[in-house]
Amino acid sequence: MRITVLTLFPKLFDNFLTQSIVKRIIQKKLVKIEIIDFRKYSKSKTKRVDDYQYGGGPGMVIGLTSIVRAIKKYKTQNSKVILLSPQGKTYTQALAKTYKQSKHLILIAGHYEGFDERLLHYVDEVVSIGDYVLTGGEVPIMVIIESVIRLLDYGINKKSLDHETFDQNLLDYPIYTKPLVFEGHQVPKVLLSGNHKLIKAYRLQAQINKTKKYRKDMYKQYLKEYQNDKIK
């Protein structure tokens, strides 16, 4: 898998690429990640990439010339071009699994007031990691990279991936470790029973209860899909 990041602040990725699972997966050559400063594709002598917006308004806008030249430089027939923007569709675990199947992702980080709207003619998708605004798209890109490459073979233990938050529209079940009792709070006895059937049933119910309490939107979707499966 190949991931190309187009950004104005490439140094923000220096530490990210040399730590934890990201480092391991790069070392295993399961993914190639290249960080590109698209400022160098500016035709301006001063390498300027932004300008004032037509019609007036606050903030500077990133123009098309440099970013489109960068896209064309790195895009192939196998590329999926993704713009990170608060205006995009919400990023989900399901989308991460879809991106995992891609041979080449091009991720674009915005800054300032945003991009010239005509950039949408050159991208395949616009994605947001949530309903809030950040200074730039670099952190969202890191979120996407980690969530995708951890799904690659040898990224994370497969058994761990089989039971994760958001699968089947449920949050993950609660987990415990030593000590058995801490300040009066005890590990549920069923987990000590050795009865795997009971433990499995307990964990599923715990997932349902947790989702109902913390994510009512997911719980409603779970009920809807559960009823559909019963009808089938």
Image: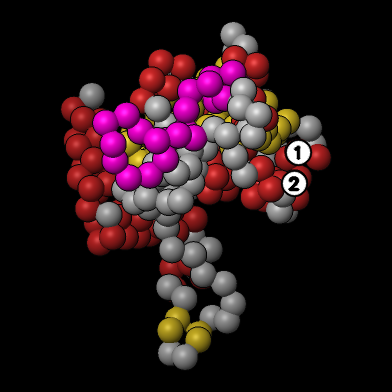
Residue 157: in sight, yes or no?
A: no
Query: Which residue is identified by label 2?
Result: 23
Q: Residues within 10 Å of mark 1 (few under 14, many from 20)?
A: some
Residue 215: in sight, yes or no?
A: yes
The residue that appears at 32% across and 45% down in the rendered structure is 58
Whether residue 69 is in magenta: the answer is: yes
Residue lying at the far top in this picture: please name it.
77
Residue lying at the far bottom in this picture: please name it.
183
In magenta, the rendered stretch is: 50-70
Quadrant into which the N terminus falls: top right
| Front residue of 219 and 185 | 219
Residue 122 image point, x, y percent: 46, 17
Image-based side of 78 in relation to 126, left or right: right
The residue that appears at 45% across and 34% down in the rendered structure is 51
The residue that appears at 52% across and 37% down in the rendered structure is 109
Residue 68 image point, x, y percent: 54, 20
> Hey, which quadrant is residue 172 in on the image?
bottom left
Query: Which residue is identified by label 1?
Result: 26
Vertical order, 104 against 207 (above or below): above
Quadrant into which the C terminus falls: top left
Whether residue 81 is in magenta: the answer is: no
**Amino acid type, callout 2:** Lys
The residue that appears at 43% across and 68% down in the rendered structure is 190
Image mark count: 2
State if disc 2 and disc 1 touch (CB < 8 Å).
Answer: yes
Image-based side of 206 in relation to 106, left or right: left
Disc 1 secondary structure class: helix
Q: CA distance from mark 1 to mark 2?
A: 5 Å
